[in-house]
Amino acid sequence: MSFTAIERRTPPRLYRSKLFVPGSRPALFEKAAAGPADVICMDLEDAVAPADKDQARDNIVAALNDVNWGDKIVTVRINGLDTNFCYRDVLALVEKGGERLDSIMIPKVGTGADVYAIDMLITQASSHVGRKKKIGLEVIIETTLGLTNIDDICTASKRLESLHFGSADYAASQGMRTTNIGGGNADYVMLTDKHPDAARERHWNDLWHYPLFRMCQAARAHGIVPIDGPFGDYSDPDGFRVQAMRTAILGCEGKWAIHPSQVALANEIYTPPQKEFERAEAILAAMKDAQEKGLGAVALNGVLIDAASIRQAQVIVQQMAMIREKSKA
Ligand code: COA
Ligand code: MG
């Protein structure tokens, strides 16, 4: 390891599914609170029309005080720093939202200074009302500027807990030729080489691989949790599944749900499969045995395992311990 230790800044919590609820539809708040999502995000930004912003803010403040959110992580997406709703969102949430709010999500972050500015507002407002619980920050990486400045963003505030990838705004920002929110594109393909005996095949590529990979890498280098964003076609559970599976494998701890039907899918896919968990436990047992015998690397079922395997296995075992704890509650 480097002499620079990476410490996880985010408390060990489950982030498998994050259900979005528009702030302008307060009738959905209780339903969201009663459902199986690990995280609830009440939205003040793009799901709320400009004329409804003030009412939505009032609805959310009331819900933070009145709704029983159980053991969920409760977060609110505020409006962007380029609007005049943003500062009013922060002040209302911190000064009137009570102690239940866990974190504030900032959309379209472009620079570390964006995060610093919101931290400053939260800090002043928290001090003014004597707030006890620290409010965390969640940031959406959904612009080319944000992706370019991602390391500065990660170090801009001690409140930062998670990075989220927003595919639709990211695509717009880069001028990508797609109107999908996540998902594939039949024209973003490779053709297999010409071959006299075989027809050429079109292989679809993953449009979102680079920004998501980059976001996961930056988040982990700074001890922050990466989370995959929305998959817009909620009538396509298979499409949701494969995208969620890819990002789970890359290191994301969860994914947004923009409809309740996506919550169970996310909970399932970001829970390590039983087989992987059993293998992780077997690796830890085999490595313990190897260490007792003074061995560094050994074979498990014909496959090499060593000290790196312990670190990989621990990630899975710790995640499962949290999931089991939650299902007992
Ligand atoms: N949270 C909690 N419950 C929800 C919900 C949500 N986000 N969306 C729908 N429901 C409930 C409905 O009230 C309905 O409940 P019922 O069976 O008791 O009547 C049930 O789930 C099925 O809803 P459905 O009729 O399929 O959806 P809809 O047409 O009412 O709403 C959306 C569809 C997509 C508009 C809605 O799910 C939504 O607003 N999602 C969040 C969008 C968002 O915040 N986007 C910003 C981030 S990208
Ligand atoms: Mg967005």
Image: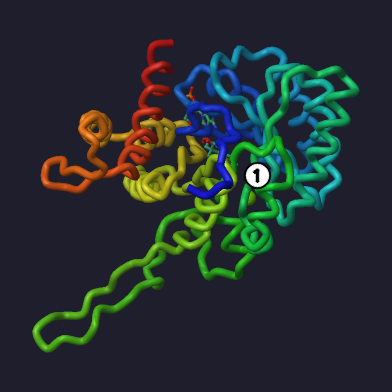
Along the viewing direction, whichever of 30 and 296 lies nearer the viewer:
296
In the figure, 253 relative to 133: above or below? below
Q: Taking 213 as reference, is 123 left or right?
A: right
> Between residues 73 and 215, which one lies in front from this camera angle?
215
The reply, left or right, for residue 326 in relation to residue 170 is left
Give me the residue at 57% from left, 62% from top. 171
Residue shown at 25% from the left, 78% from the top: 192
Three-letter residue code for mark 1: Val
The residue wearing badge 1 is 139
Q: Nearer the viewer, residue 258 or 272?
A: 272
* Secondary element at tag 1: strand
Mark 1 vs ligand 2: CB below 8 Å: no
Q: Which residue is at the far left? A: 197
One can see residue 239 in this view: no
For disc 1, the neighbor class at 10 Å (few under 14, some 14 to 19, many from 20) is many
For residue 312, which quarter of the picture? top left
For the question of whether residue 44 can be seen, the reply is yes
Quadrant occupied by the C terminus: top left
Name the image colouring: rainbow
Q: Residue at x 34, y 45 (%)?
A: 308
Picture coordinates of residue 114, whole percent (x, y): 77, 49
**Residue 131 picture location, percent across and down:** 80, 19
Instruction: Please state the total of marks drawn on the protein image.
Output: 1
Q: Is residue 272 above or below residue 193?
A: above
Q: Residue 182 at what x, y percent from top left?
A: 47, 54
Q: Give how far across and how far down residue 136 sits, in percent.
A: 68, 32
Q: Is residue 122 left or right of residue 222?
A: right
Residue in the picture at 88% in, 31% down: 124
For this orientation, the residue located farthest to the right is: 128
Question: In this view of the protein, which residue sits in the foreground, 78 or 221?
Answer: 221
